[in-house]
Amino acid sequence: MLNAATAERRLLDTAQALFYAKGIQAVGMDEIREGSGVSLKRLYQLFPSKEELVEETLRRRSAAIQQAMNQYTESVDTPREQILAVFDYLKDWFNAPNFRGCAFINSFGELGGNSAGVAEIVRAHKKELAHTLSSLVTSMGQPSSLGDQLALLANGAMVTAAIVGTDQAAQDAKAAAISLLDNAAQAA
Amino acid sequence: MLNAATAERRLLDTAQALFYAKGIQAVGMDEIREGSGVSLKRLYQLFPSKEELVEETLRRRSAAIQQAMNQYTESVDTPREQILAVFDYLKDWFNAPNFRGCAFINSFGELGGNSAGVAEIVRAHKKELAHTLSSLVTSMGQPSSLGDQLALLANGAMVTAAIVGTDQAAQDAKAAAISLLDNAAQAA
DNA sequence: CATGCCAGAGAACGATCGTTCTCCCTTCGG
DNA sequence: CCGAAGGGAGAACGATCGTTCTCTGGCATG
């Protein structure tokens, strides 16, 4: 028998990986049980429904992304460098093995119309990204709409990298970000 | 009994709307039969499997989008205006009723990992968009990578408009596009 | 009018899903 | 040593899916 905390971690790890790789509806609860080694009984004790398991994996992933991105932005000092560090983070992420786009965008496309809970978590995650970028640009004295524009670039890069399948998306995104920053700085 | 061409059109109309509204896996063949008024027997005569019906709706939608976008770009003369017309098209699209993001991005997120056919159609569609924009920027004497950057913006706007749910995404995208164009023109 | 054919309506089928239940074994307190 | 509690393995259940089959009725052709 496993420690409850260990079982929960294994379940979330397994479910997160499977949902991301194959889509949520394509993964059955029995596949999660098999992958995690946690019995169905315990699974339903910890997560009373698939919906709750899905939402918890998304919340956990959002926190992990936030933390990983912070490591990139905190490694440099100026707001401009921090913004560009976000795009460096994207580039490294795109080149990670098994990259298959943004789990939040994918989940929204699959379930956003049917699951209000998932839609809300995805919305919060994307607002957080826009807020992070907007905070950085306002600290440079630029309007927050520039942060929203950079967020558009970031999300577009995620989608393009997944679909067209090249890290050229990361290069283009960073180049476009620099262009937007330069154009804004010059107008000031 | 219905004309074969009429049955096919009704099936594709119904399936396309339902797939877009609820996701592909959430729509059953019986729901398509009910919505279209075409019997299951005829449905399977025209489309031997759900997969083929899905792919045909995507191909058809891709052609329709291409055509609709052309109407916007052909209404103005200069390449710069034509590029901005693409973003006007996006804005009008985002404000259409029942807008729920880009069907290709949504389908890829849901099935891209499991259906090679769908993945290929989505990839071709997104390459076409990037190619359209790249053609316009090269006719302005700009490098095609600028077109790829504009495509990132467009795809990011689609995702953001769907998730965060505002046409501010369209405004931001157009403003960013102008910024990219201005910055490139000035460097030349 | 008789006959053969095709389409529509919907039952049927096998698979799979999320979820629950049964049975058995281990473990631990008295 | 005994008994109760609880967890693991997996069967079971009801629903739903994609797909096929059956039956029936109308329609065209001789």
Image (spheres, coloured by chain):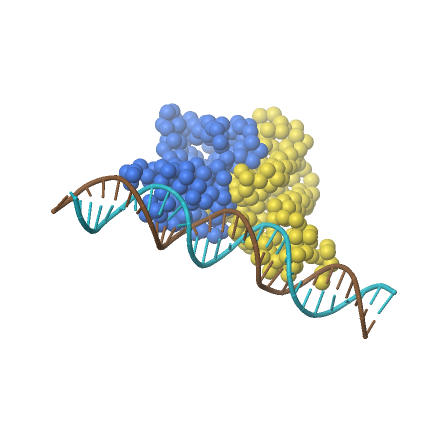
Chain colours: A blue, B yellow, C brown, D cyan
* Among the 4 quarters of the image, the one containing residue A53: top left
Q: Is residue A163 visible?
A: yes
* Among the 4 quarters of the image, the one containing residue A19: top left
| Residue C7 drawn at (x, y percent) | 71, 60
Give left or right: position of A179 versus B67.
Answer: left
* Among the 4 quarters of the image, the one containing residue A17: top left
Q: Is residue B72 visible?
A: no
Q: Where A168 falls versus B47 (above or below)?
A: above
| Residue B171 drawn at (x, y percent) | 52, 43
Give left or right: position of A110 versus B135.
Answer: left
Front position in the image: A10 or C12: C12
| Residue B29 drawn at (x, y percent) | 59, 54
On the rendered image, what quadrant is the N terminus of chain A found in? top left
Which residue does the image show at 45% across and 51% down from the upper left? Answer: A115
Front position in the image: A151 or A98: A98
Front position in the image: A53 or C7: C7
Which residue does the image show at 36% across and 33% down from the upper left? Answer: A67
Give left or right: position of B165 versus B91.
Answer: left
Front position in the image: B72 or B66: B66
| Residue A170 drawn at (x, y percent) | 51, 29
Give left or right: position of B69 versus A28.
Answer: right
Which residue does the image show at 55% across and 39% down from the upper left? Answer: B114
Which residue does the image show at 40% across and 35% down from the upper left? Answer: A65
